[in-house]
Image (cartoon, rainbow, N blue to C red):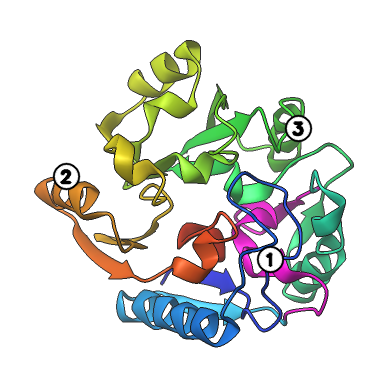
């Protein structure tokens, strides 16, 4: 069974601006955010995955975006080193959680934002740099994981609106994914195209974070407002489930950002 780490949005709000989507004038309806988070959690569970949680910490509103906490391989964890000071306080709480749950934990001061910037598609690992992660970190991760079966693909993000790879790409399985080609330089687009079948997300739905989806077997969970992408995905044999993510979009995140796959 797939296991997913989430963090309740008890303290979620937008009090600073560290990506183009965040505006301090955007007031988060915390009750609605909790309702949306719980709907996402229930949908994940209904699709056959188990959700485990980490306690939220007051003063760390973006801790809810657990995808950014770390990158995992089996029971090894490389912790994130967040670019912005506003999120750097999260690290010690995630480190404590992983250690308490039996993981071998490592990491250093090289900027890296976890599974927000590195996505597995089977044994392929698509790893991005450009805004939140330093390209040099992937050699360190490769040495730590020490797993020759991982096929690394290093990609360069160029559009600041899509500051993590998981806002621009979602592997639906090891052979096919949804993709926003405009977020990458030409070399990265070619790297993608040589690695798997890509379904291009309509431009108007990239800003609804259609690529920021959760995959559980044949089930794809994505934000509302992604009808065109849904049609494309379902034509390729997948079942799409929609969740209202309006409150989290105010912070530049959606379904995938709120989850970290543990296996």
Q: Which residue is mark 2?
A: 232
Foreground: disc 3 or disc 1: 1
Circles 2 and 1, Cβ within 8 Å, touching? The answer is: no
Q: Is 200 rendered above or below residue 185? A: below
Judge whether residue 262 can be spotted in this image.
no
Q: Is 151 rendered above or below residue 81? A: above
- Disc 1 secondary structure class: loop
Foreground: disc 2 or disc 1: 1
Q: Earlier in the sequence, mark 2 or mark 3?
A: 3
Q: Earlier in the sequence, mark 2 or mark 1?
A: 1
In front of the other: 178 or 197: 178
- Disc 3 secondary structure class: helix
Picture residue at 66% right of the left edge, 63% below the top = 25
Residue 227, disc: none
Q: Is 154 rendered above or below residue 118? A: above
Q: Is residue 105 left or right of residue 225?
A: right
Foreground: disc 2 or disc 3: 2
Picture residue at 27% right of the left edge, 33% below the top = 200
Q: Position of residue 69 (x, y in %)?
A: 70, 58
Q: Earlier in the sequence, mark 3 or mark 1?
A: 1
Q: Which residue is mark 3?
A: 137
In front of the other: 242 or 235: 242
Residue 14, disc: 1
Q: Which residues are magenta?
A: 56-81
Q: Is residue 257 left or right of residue 207?
A: right
- Disc 2 secondary structure class: helix
Q: Position of residue 236 (x, y in %)?
A: 14, 45
């Amino acid at each position: 069974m797939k296991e997913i780490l989430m963090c309740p949005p008890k303290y979620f709000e937008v009090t600073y601006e560290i990506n183009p989507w965040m505006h301090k004038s955007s007031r988060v309806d915390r009750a609605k955010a909790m309702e949306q988070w719980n709907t996402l959690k229930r949908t994940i569970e209904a699709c056959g995955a188990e959700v485990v949680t980490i306690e939220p910490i007051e003063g760390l509103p973006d801790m809810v975006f657990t995808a950014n906490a770390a990158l995992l391989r089996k029971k090894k964890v490389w912790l994130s080193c967040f670019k912005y000071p506003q999120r750097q306080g999260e690290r010690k709480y995630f480190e404590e959680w992983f250690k308490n749950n039996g993981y071998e934990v490592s990491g250093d001061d090289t900027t890296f934002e976890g599974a927000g910037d590195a996505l597995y598609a089977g044994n392929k690992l698509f790893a991005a740099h450009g805004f939140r992660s330093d390209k040099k970190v992937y050699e360190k991760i490769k040495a730590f994981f020490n797993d020759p079966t991982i096929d690394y693909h290093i990609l360069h993000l160029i559009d600041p609106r899509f500051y993590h790879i998981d806002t621009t790409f979602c592997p639906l399985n090891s052979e096919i994914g949804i993709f926003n080609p405009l977020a990458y330089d030409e070399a990265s687009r070619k790297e993608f195209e040589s690695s798997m079948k890509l379904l291009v997300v309509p431009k108007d739905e990239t800003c609804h974070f259609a690529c920021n989806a959760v995959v559980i077997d044949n089930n794809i969970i994505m934000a509302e407002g992604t009808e065109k992408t849904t049609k494309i995905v379902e034509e390729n044999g997948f079942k799409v489930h929609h969740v209202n993510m309006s409150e989290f979009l105010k912070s530049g995140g959606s379904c995938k950002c709120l989850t970290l796959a543990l296996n």
